[in-house]
Every structure is written in structure tokens, then in C-alpha cells.
Amino acid sequence: MASDSTDFAAASRAALADPQLRGNFRRAMDGLMGKRAAQFPDAGEWHGVRGLAASVRLRALSKLPELLEKLEENCTRNGITVHWAATTDEANAIALDILHRVDAKLVVKGKSMVTEEMHLNAVLEKDGIEVLESDLGEYIVQLDGTMPSHIIMPAIHLNTKQIAHLFKRRIKDAESREDAAYLTDLARRVLRAKFQAADVGMSGVNAAVAETGTLCLIENEGNGRMCTTVPPVHIAFMGLEKVVEKLEDVPPVISLLPRSATGQPITTYVNMISGPRRPGEKDGPREVHLVILDNGRSSIYADPELRDTLRCIRCGACMNHCPVYTKVGGHAYEAPYPGPIGKILVPQIEGLDKRGALPHACTMCNACVEICPVKIPIVEIMGRLRVEAVRPGGAVKGGGAKASRTEAMVWSGWAAMNASPAAYRVATLAMSRVGNAAPSSLPLLKDWTNVRTKPRFAARTLHDLARAKGIPDA
């Protein structure tokens, strides 16, 4: 059986032993769940708009190859240069080629989960290019030298006191003030100077419209608009699933996304980018590039059941309502996408041999499915990935890596026992008599007893108890 490249269990234990971290997450998640609920007081409206957004995503995925070709055609007509990247290495190489050509020394970035997936910051810094995150939460975790703990609120694991200490330590002339307004203003002053000096701005894409070649980007801080308009070159990054067919498909998505994510009726900024600066226009970049990343998404798309993973609009609502995520936080996953969506997306991108533990980090409570604004059947996909992890030769990268001969024998024995009434009676009688003498260190049983009390067999079987009450065996 292959071992994961990360240790979710150990990271979770460390998180659970940190009362400050748990307190920060509990407060934040309670607030987010309350704000989201307040945005959907009308169950009928919720079901209506949810169904509409789900149909938008399903229709886009049903035509994905065609829409991607149309997106490229219309972006090119608008003056946007489109690049295709099969892997994160290719996407990073494309970014470096552009940066080298324009002799870029400083890059400012808006929020982009795809660039987190690419580990782009590390690649640029290794190449001697300064890169600065301009989203406040991303700026905080960059200063802290950590990764985002949430896809919408990257620094949600920190409280105001911790951020004040961080700024005091990392920003010149920062005062030691636990004041959110002061800290925000301090970050704004640092970032404002960088926007003016940057050679290239980078951003993500919330939706790319095939029929018009328009890139839609929503945000609250104005940093996204600064990144995409002030520097002379703008590079946008998106996973290939972010395409939608028509402009009229965008409103249902941007209506649901902020309400599900942060409990806002709408984001402060909605940017529709349709090309570089035209002659006579006073602002905007002279070059706009769009990098479309595959990185395993084509394989996900090829499987009708797993394809639903690509419906995600990255609102993070599944995380806010997940009983596992809210206890251990995002860093325990050691992945760009934590929480329920990360448990199904990351193993498919990186492989079950490296991330096979993630689909098991779930109670199957279905809270994520109930809350998902585009109706992703997360729990069903999670079950499928658990099967793929122990089924050699399956459809998912790294499938079969968790196969265990011992476990297979145990399940074969269980199936045989339940297929024969006589075998069932003998086995259950034996377990009721001597089962409790089994040591906790037995293979498979020890995986349970490592963190739980050993289960005890009842002294009498169910059939015994039924017969004692005069109920005959069937």
C-alpha cells in the first residue's frame, strides 16, 4: 500500500491540539454560516437560483471542448493572447516566458487559486522576480510564509492580535496596534506603491464567457481591478472548467457566489475584461494574456461521474459547513484546495497514491451537498474515490495505491459469512464468546483503536435476543 506524500492525520492532530486555531475557526465559521443563511431567507428563491446556476454549469460542461475553442477564438479577436497549458510546469513556463520578454522585475497578483495550484510564487521568486500578493488575506499569509487556509478567506486562521504582531514584525515602521482599520490601511499603503511600480499584474478568472471572449473577475478590495488595469501587462489564469457559454450565464453565478461565500448580496467590484487598452483609451494594460490550465481536468472530464467535480464555482461554502474542516482548519490538508471540494479535487489532480487519505477525511454527513450552490454530489464522488483508491487499474490517477491484501481478505470473509445463514450463526456466536479477547493491535483493528476505544461485542447475538422474546428466525 502506497503512502501519501502528506500526512493529513498528523496535521489534523496538531491542529486539534491548538486551542487558538480552533477558536479562530469556530468564530469565523459561525459568523459565515449565519451571514449565508441570512442571504437565503426564501427557500423557494434559493432552490430556484440554485437550480439555474447548476444548469449553467452542467450546460457548460456538456459543451466544454466546443466552448473552449469558441472562447479562444473570441478572446483572440478581442486582442487577448490565449495560452494552453497541460501541466502546472507548462503554465509556469508560459508565465516566465512573458515576464522575461517584458523584462519584468515586479509582479502584483490578485487572488487566484490556479496560481496556488501552480506554486507560481515560488517559481517566480526562484527566478529572481519579486511577486506581491495584493488581496489582503493573501498578503497576510505571504508575509507569514504560509499557504492560504481557505479559498475565499486565506488568513481566516489568524485573529486581529496575531495579524498585528505579524505586521509589526514584517512591515517597516508598523505600529503595534490591534486595530483592523489601522492594519488594513497599513497594508493598503504598502500595496498602493507596488501597484504603481509593477511591470505585470496577474489575476484569476471567476468565469470566462465563450460567446464574447470576456473574462469576469469579482472581488471586494479593488486590488483585482488595480492588478488588471494599472501594470502594462496583465496575465489571467484559469482552470479549463471556468468557461460559460453566454454572457447571460454570468449573473446567476455571481449572484450565488458571494451570498454563499461571505454572506454578501454582491461583491464590491465586478470586472468584465474584454481586451487590452484600445487607441484613445486612458487606462488599461497594453497586453492581456489568458493561460488556460488543464492539470488533470481533462481526465476528470472524461469520467461522467467524476465530471461533476468541475462544476465548482469556488465559493467555499462547503468548507464553512464541513464538521471536519471547521475543526482542523485548512492547513491540515496541505493542499491549495482544502475542505470537501479539496477532498475530491486534489486526489484527482495529484493522484490517489499521493492524496489517498483525503477522501477518507469525511463523516459523510452530506452538509456540503446540501449547501453547494451548484449541487455537486460531493459525497457520492467521495465514495467513488474511496473505491478507486483500492481498485487497481481504475480511472483515477494513482488508483489502487491503497489496495491491501489483508483488507481484501477480511471483506471477502465478511461477504461469505453474510451469504450463508449457517456461517453467520457460527461467526456471530464465536465473536460474542471470544471476540473481545482480540488484541487492539490486530491489522485493520489498530487503525480504529489508534484514535478510538476498541468496540466490544455484545454477550448475546441479535438472534439470541430475538428468540428469547419469542420471535422465531426467518
Image: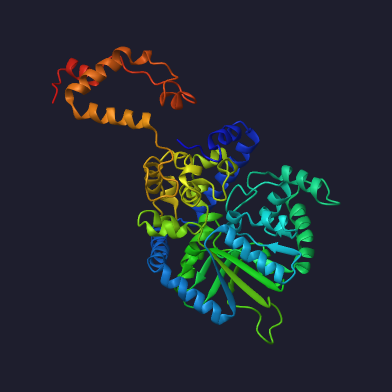
- In percent of width and height, residue 240 lies at 49, 64
Give the vertical position of 309 relative to 72 (above or below). above
Residue 82 seen anywhere in this rendered image of the structure: yes
Q: Residue at x 36, y 15 (%)?
A: 436
Say how many tags the image has: 0
Give the vertical position of 103 relative to 429 (above or below). below
For this view, does 47 lie left or right of residue 296?
A: left
- In percent of width and height, residue 239 lies at 52, 62
The colour mode here is rainbow
Q: Residue 116: which quarter of the image?
A: bottom right
- In percent of width and height, residue 132 lies at 72, 58
Q: Residue at x 58, y 36 (%)?
A: 11
Residue farthest bottom in this picture: 280
For this view, does 242 lie left or right of residue 123?
A: left
- Quarter of the C terminus within the rendering: top left
Task: Using the image as rendered, state which of residue 159 and residue 244 is in the foreground.
Answer: 244
Give the vertical position of 55 relative to 337 (above or below). below
- Quarter of the N terminus within the rendering: top left
Task: Using the image as rendered, state which of residue 128 and residue 247 is in the foreground.
Answer: 128
